[in-house]
Image (cartoon, rainbow, N blue to C red):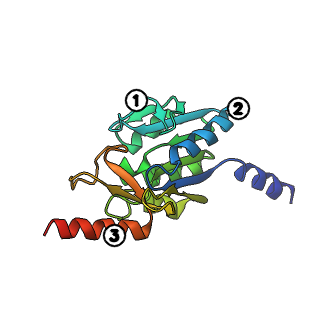
């Protein structure tokens, strides 16, 4: 009985996957940074990663829209994360939608090795389609937190990232000049208007 109790304490201690998802400007990175800073404050060994392609604010740091900053390691592929995580307690991953599909297996492996994995990313692209490895990450997560922006048209909760410039690429880095958060209703109106204009 004692062995069973000790085993449960050890296995329940750290290994887990937490996903923070939502539209652009919803505070995903802000929440990721908050959780990681708390882990550092608790003297846990923390390592943060972001895709090397995301150089909007900084080539290395993870920076939220509100300019909160935490140092990170840019990586080109999900498997590279495993090279830096042998001696850590917590792994943070920002902009997870830009990673390859292998990120799901990488995060599972980390969590199964007793590491707490905190992931932030867009759950949908500008077309309203599930984005990259995010659906798979949400499926394997122990906890999923969906955060919302505020619709710039009506003030309701927004969960769509509407692209305001003409570009059909799924991977298109941008900020407020290229994207706006919209609720479902306003997003549908905007798409319908664009389709009418393109006829």
- N-terminal-most mark, 3 or 2: 2
Labelled pair 3, 1 in contact (Cβ < 8 Å): no
Q: In this view, does 185 lie to the left or right of 11?
A: left
Q: In this view, does 74 lie to the left or right of 70?
A: left
Determine which residue is flagged by label 1: 58
Residue drawn at (47%, 43%) of the image: 94
Residue drawn at (21%, 69%) of the image: 195
Q: Nearer the viewer, mark 2 or mark 1?
A: 1
| In the image, residue 184 above or below residue 145 | below
Crowd band around label 2 with a 10 angstrom C-alpha radius: few (<14), some (14–19), many (20+): few
Q: Is residue 124 visible?
A: yes
In the current view of this chain or complex, which residue is farthest to the front? 154
Whole-percent x, y for residue 183 in the image: 45, 64
Q: Identify which residue, 93 or 23, lies in the foreground.
A: 23
In the current view of this chain or complex, which residue is farthest to the right? 2
**Quadrant in which residue 184 is drawn:** bottom left
Determine which residue is flagged by label 3: 189
Crowd band around label 3 with a 10 angstrom C-alpha radius: few (<14), some (14–19), many (20+): few
Q: Image quadrant for the N terminus? A: bottom right
Q: Identify which residue, 107 or 71, lies in the foreground.
A: 71
Q: Identify which residue, 58 or 12, lies in the foreground.
A: 58
Whole-percent x, y for residue 125 in the image: 35, 58
Separation of residues labelled 3 and 2 (CA atoms): 45 Å
**Quadrant in which residue 2 is drawn:** bottom right
Residue 41, numbered label: 2
Residue 129, numbered label: none
Q: Can residue 86 be seen in this view?
A: no
Q: Is residue 138 left or right of residue 97?
A: right
């Amino acid at each position: 009985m004692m062995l069973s109790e000790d085993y449960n304490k050890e296995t329940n201690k750290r290994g887990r996957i937490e996903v923070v998802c939502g539209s652009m400007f919803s505070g995903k990175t802000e929440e990721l940074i908050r959780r990681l800073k708390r882990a550092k404050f608790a003297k846990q060994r923390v390592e943060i990663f972001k895709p090397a392609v995301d150089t909007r604010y900084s080539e290395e740091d993870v920076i939220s829209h509100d300019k909160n900053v935490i140092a990170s390691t840019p990586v080109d592929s999900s498997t590279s994360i495993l090279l830096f995580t042998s001696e850590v307690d917590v792994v943070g991953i920002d902009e997870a939608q830009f990673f390859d599909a292998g990120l799901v297996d990488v995060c599972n492996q980390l969590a199964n090795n007793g590491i707490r994995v905190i992931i932030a990313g867009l759950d949908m692209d500008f077309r309203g389609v599930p984005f990259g490895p995010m659906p798979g990450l949400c499926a394997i997560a122990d906890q999923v937190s969906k955060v919302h922006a505020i619709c710039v048209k009506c003030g309701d909760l927004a969960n769509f990232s509407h692209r305001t410039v003409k570009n059909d690429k799924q991977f298109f880095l941008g900020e407020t000049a290229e994207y706006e958060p919209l609720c479902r209703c306003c997003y549908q109106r905007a798409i319908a208007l664009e389709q009418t204009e393109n006829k």
